[in-house]
Image (cartoon, helix red, strand yellow):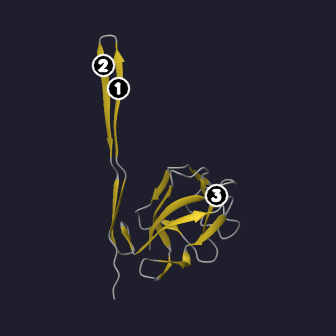
């Protein structure tokens, strides 16, 4: 059986920004819709693997997702990412605490960040998305730079998040 991947990652912003003046009104309409299309392969604008999951972390809990050889796809195949082309994380709107992304103690998947200790907060109901469609993507190195840490920022309640990884 041959597995192939095609994917489209997009963001749509449509906004109307208005100001009522003494004699009339002024408005500005913004349309911003970047879209990234991936075909099957390993080069620029290409990807081979897709991982998706909705996960829950108990109060104050953490987990390290091993991006090189532990995660499995929808068909049960083990994925060994070499490069991440898209990372999307959404935090459930019912969360009380933030979902923290990054800062693993060792073997940090740090290509997403400026420093191995950097952490991104995903607020309840929020999202973070990183896309690198070029051939380089975000590097993953098995055993030395392959752990993506996710953590519940506080005590008292669990957090639920959804993660999407696209890569080669």
The one nearer the camera, 119 or 55, is 55
Q: Are marks 2 and 1 in contact (CB under 8 Å)?
A: yes
Mark drawn on residue 152: 3
| 153 sits left or right of 124 in the view | right
CA separation, marks 2 and 1? 7 Å
Residue picked out by circle 1? 18
Dot 2: element: strand
| Residue 146 showing in the rendered view | no
**Residue 159 lies in what quarter of the image?**
bottom right
Q: Residue at x 53, y 68 (%)?
A: 139
The percent position of residue 87, horizontal first and vertical second, equals 48, 62
| Few, some or many residues within 10 Å of mark 1 (<14, 14–19, 20+) | few
Q: Residue furthest top?
A: 22
Q: Residue at x 60, y 49 (%)?
A: 96
Quarter holding the N terminus?
A: bottom left
Dot 1: element: strand
Sequence-earlier tag: 3 or 2: 2
């Amino acid at each position: 059986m041959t597995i192939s991947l095609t994917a489209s990652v997009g963001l749509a912003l449509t906004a109307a920004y208005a100001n009522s003046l003494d004699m009339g009104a002024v408005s500005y309409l913004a349309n911003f819709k970047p879209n990234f299309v991936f075909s099957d392969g390993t080069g620029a604008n290409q990807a081979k693997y897709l991982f998706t999951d909705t996960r829950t972390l108990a109060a104050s809990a953490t987990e390290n997702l091993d991006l090189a050889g532990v995660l499995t796809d929808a068909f049960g195949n083990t994925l060994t990412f070499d490069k991440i082309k898209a990372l999307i994380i959404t935090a459930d709107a019912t969360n009380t605490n933030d979902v923290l992304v990054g800062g693993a103690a060792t073997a940090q998947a740090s290509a997403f960040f400026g420093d191995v200790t950097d952490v991104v907060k995903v607020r309840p109901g929020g999202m973070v998305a990183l896309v690198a469609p070029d051939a380089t993507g975000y590097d993953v190195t098995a055993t030395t730079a392959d752990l993506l840490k996710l953590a519940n920022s506080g005590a008292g309640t669990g957090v639920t998040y959804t993660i999407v990884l696209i890569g080669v």
